[in-house]
Amino acid sequence: MAGNENGSGNGAGPGKHRKFATRLLHFGGEIDKTTGAASVPIYQASTFHHFSLDNPPEYDYTRSGNPTRQALEDYIAELEGGARGFAFASGMAAISAAFMLLSAGDHVICTEDVYGGTYRLLTTIMNRMNVETTFVDMTDFEAVKVALKPNTKAVFMETPSNPTLKITDIAEITEWAKSHQLLTMLDNTFMTPYHQRPLELGVDLVLHSATKFLGGHSDVLAGLAVTADDSLGLRMKQIQNGLGNVLGMQDSWLLIRGMKTLQARMEFSEKGARRLAEWLSSHPAVEKVYYPGLEGHPRREIHEKQSQGYGAVVSFDVGSEERAKQLLGKVTIPLVAVSLGAVESILSYPAKMSHAAMPKEVRHERGIGDGLLRYSVGLEDIEDIIADLEQALR
Ligand SMILES: *Cc1c(COP(=O)(O)O)cnc(C)c1O
């Protein structure tokens, strides 16, 4: 695997020489400086007193800055190894803020199997702002190059993609993008900084739906962004303050709390996902399994070059809508729902959930058939998960 197995990034925080698991707990904001309290206080205030008009306070209004949110923003910047972090009201709030870096007349190259909400943002809102997008298969480098136009300003990546876990070569695309002065953005939701740190591969801006693995408990909606350098950080700060789509302090605190156990959760769930993928691969009722850790998964070697793990999401095809429905009706362990990356397992049916808005032909062309299911492995015992699926597949 790339880098080092134990995942020490090159974050700029207090413990950059330490391993990832340690940095998750000792990130600089874990002890309140005034009282010694063992967690960041929730500064439930919208505004701050000016003790002296000649010396404005560090924080003056919560939309522009709040100490609880700041602790979270510093935390994610440290984990991704970036310059500045930003917390937003949702993953889509973070992603839409990122697209505000563009101007009318600009063109974006975006991975074709991008998250549905991002697709919707680009095709129903950004297009009205006169920002045009070309969607390309990013596993095809030639197709990416062909998409370049004189007004191309940015490239948006997501890897592994959802739900068929296609692998984009981050370094290859980023290097090419830089040679054309394009801004590079990457949605790192599926991997988290524990498994993949795109800034180390040259990406300018990393985005997260922290609603998923980072929060980890299906109880908070949040988005995060991290910039590689300060100048992009200043531009993002201006956008965050201008749009006002910030994360509240209660949710900022809750997210910090969830993130402390990220490695413990990811490690456990990934181990289960590997076992599940192997088991599904040998099951006669399963036609196809998608998991980057499986031998034969397309471009697995590229994934291993840029990531330290395979994640906890396994997709598999049971052949037909009828059989998928039957399975969904019979499983007893997972939540049957959209979303992923939680302590409890979550089973989704992309054709009727996340990708319902996609025309059937396009959906099928992208390998998202009527029998495709997506299993996000939680923290239950994997043998119980398998026994549950076994009875449901029977
Ligand atoms: C869920 C998700 C989003 C959107 O995040 P929200 O928090 O729901 O707004 C973006 N990208 C990916 C990959 C996601 O899974």
Image (tube, grey):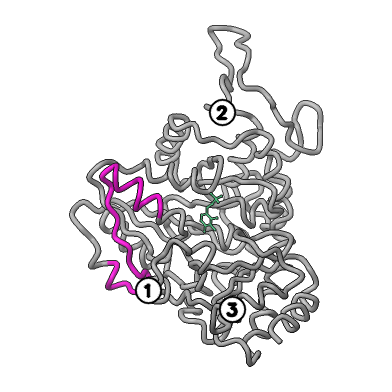
- Say above or below: 27 vs 123: above
Please name the residue that numbered disc 1 is placed on.
361
Identify the residue shown where x is 54% and y is 40%.
Answer: 88
Ranked by sequence position, the earlier of labels 3 and 1 is: 3
Name the residue located 44 percent from the left edge and 50 percent from the top edge: 205
User: What residue is at 59 percent from the left and 71 percent from the top?
Assistant: 374
In the image, taking residue 228 as reference, residue 46 lies left or right, namely right
Quadrant in which the C terminus appears = bottom right
- Circle number at residue 293: 3
Q: Is residue 28 left or right of residue 192?
A: right
Label 1 neighbour load within 10 Å: few <14, some 14-19, many 20+: few
The percent coordinates of residue 196 (x first, y second) are 55, 62
Crowd rating for badge 2 (residues with CA inside 10 Å; few <14, some 14–19, many 20+) = some
Vertical arrangement, residue 130 with respect to residue 55, above or below: below
* Residue type at tag 2: Gly
Q: Secondary structure at mark 1?
A: helix
User: Residue placed at 56% from the left, 11% from the top?
Assistant: 55
Residue that badge 2 annotates: 65
The answer to which of 385 and 305 lies nearer the viewer is: 385
